[in-house]
Image: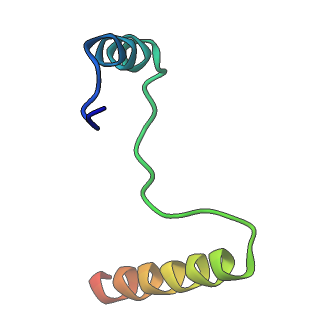
Amino acid sequence: MSSTRSLRNVETRKKKARRAIPRTTKTRNQGNTATGRKRLKKAAGLRRGAKAATA
């Protein structure tokens, strides 16, 4: 059996993709884990620095 997708599976994927609700792409990773919060804090700091530099 080959690893390529069968035609039936390709059709299924296309149908599912068409039905999926369009969502905006994430601009930053969010989450309530320690690592996630640390990354958000760092991203916020970098943004604040960038904003201060332009102002």
Tell me if 37 is positioned left or right of 40 in this view: right
Which residue corresponds to the image point at 41% horizontal and 89% vertical from the top-left?
A: 49
Residue at 31% from the left image edge and 89% from the top image edge: 53
Q: Residue at the front extreme?
A: 1
User: Who is closer to the viewer here, 46 or 37?
Assistant: 37
Give the image's coloring scheme: rainbow
- The N terminus lies in quadrant: top left
Q: Is residue 10 above or below residue 35?
A: above
Considering only vertical position in the picture, is 52 above or below 29? below
Left/right placement of residue 37 relative to residue 19 reads: right
Residue drawn at the location 67% of the way across and 64% of the way down:
31
Task: Estimate the x, y position of residue 44 in percent, counting from the top left.
Answer: 53, 78
Tell me the quadrant of the picture where the C terminus can be found: bottom left
45 or 24, which is in the foreground?
24
Most foreground residue, 47 or 41: 41
In the image, residue 12 sits, relative to residue 37, either above or below, namely above
Task: Give the percent coordinates (x, y) of residue 28.
Answer: 47, 63
